[in-house]
Amino acid sequence: ILSKNRRIDPKTLNLFLNPSAKELDLYDCAKLKADDFIKIFQCCPKIERLSVRCAIQFKGSVMKYLVESSVRLTTLSIHGANLLDDSMWLEFFKAKGQYLRELKVYYTDVSFGDGIVAAIAEHCPDLTRLKIEHNQQVTDAGLLHIAKLKKLEHLGLDIYKPTTTAPYVEIIKSVGSTLRTLSLANIDELSDEVLAAIHDTCTHLTKLRLFK
């Protein structure tokens, strides 16, 4: 279910909520409040795949409700949830990480740091798709944990803090053989070593993006 042009608000949201719905894609949630996000989980208890953009009010109270609910998301794509702190992300992965197959997190500002990437590696063993983009907190130390996700098939990273070549090489050598798509952005020291690792390991790639 797709909504564009900021037409989703607390009233129109109700048109998209169905108890049997397993997938919900809301393009622009800027007008939604925390209670509206909670309503999604209340009205759609069978939901498995959720994508929300401009989810500014998807904050701690929403995540707490999700953690304590019976909802088992297999896919979560969330954009702009700046009010979620690391403690709530940690609770989510501890409680629901075992069900996740796809995770995409964009624009998190001061949260979603190295400890959260470590939690993903520990609690999301069946993850096949991971995107962490426009992230301001992850460092080399956090990136290294991604190498533990042995079932990854799709990986996208766009990290704003300065990073070095080493963790990317480690990731590629560890999980590159299963990757189908790989996108790496804003690597300050992208070297031939990364390219060599991709060449030697990523034999099943159908899409490769390297850019600054």
Image (cartoon, helix red, strand yellow):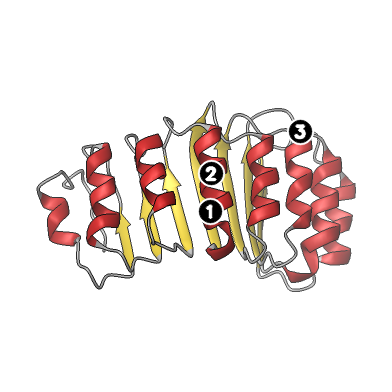
Q: Residue at the spot x=20%, y=67% of the render?
A: 18
Q: Which mark is residue 125?
A: none
The residue nearer to you, when weighing 185 against 92, is 92
Please state which of the two labelled residues, at mark 3 or mark 1, is closer to the viewer. Answer: 1
Q: Can residue 183 be seen in this view?
A: no
Mark 3 or 1, nearer chain start: 1
Label 1 CA crowd tier, 10 Å (few <14, some 14–19, many 20+): some
Tell me the residue at 25%/56% (across/down): 42
Residue behind mark 2:
91
Quarter of the picture holding the N terminus: bottom left
Q: Residue at x 78, y 62 (%)?
A: 175
| Residue 85 vertical placement versus 41 (above, below) | above
Secondary structure beneath disc 2? helix
The kind of residue on which mark 3 rests is Thr
User: In the figure, is residue 45 to the left or right of 66?
Assistant: left
> Of the residues shown, which amino acid type is indicated by label 1?
Ala
Q: What residue type is labelled 2?
A: Glu
Disc assigned to residue 163: 3
Q: Residues within 10 Å of mark 2 (few under 14, many from 20)?
A: some
In this view, the residue in front, 133 or 61, is 61
**Measured along the vertical axis of the image, is residue 52 above or below residue 50?**
above
Q: Judge from the rendering whether residue 161 lies leftward or rightward of residue 18; answer left or right.
A: right
**Figure disc tally:** 3
Contact between labelled residues 2 and 1, with CB atoms less than 8 Å apart: yes
Q: Name the residue under label 1.
A: 95
Tell me where residue 111 sits by quadrant. top right
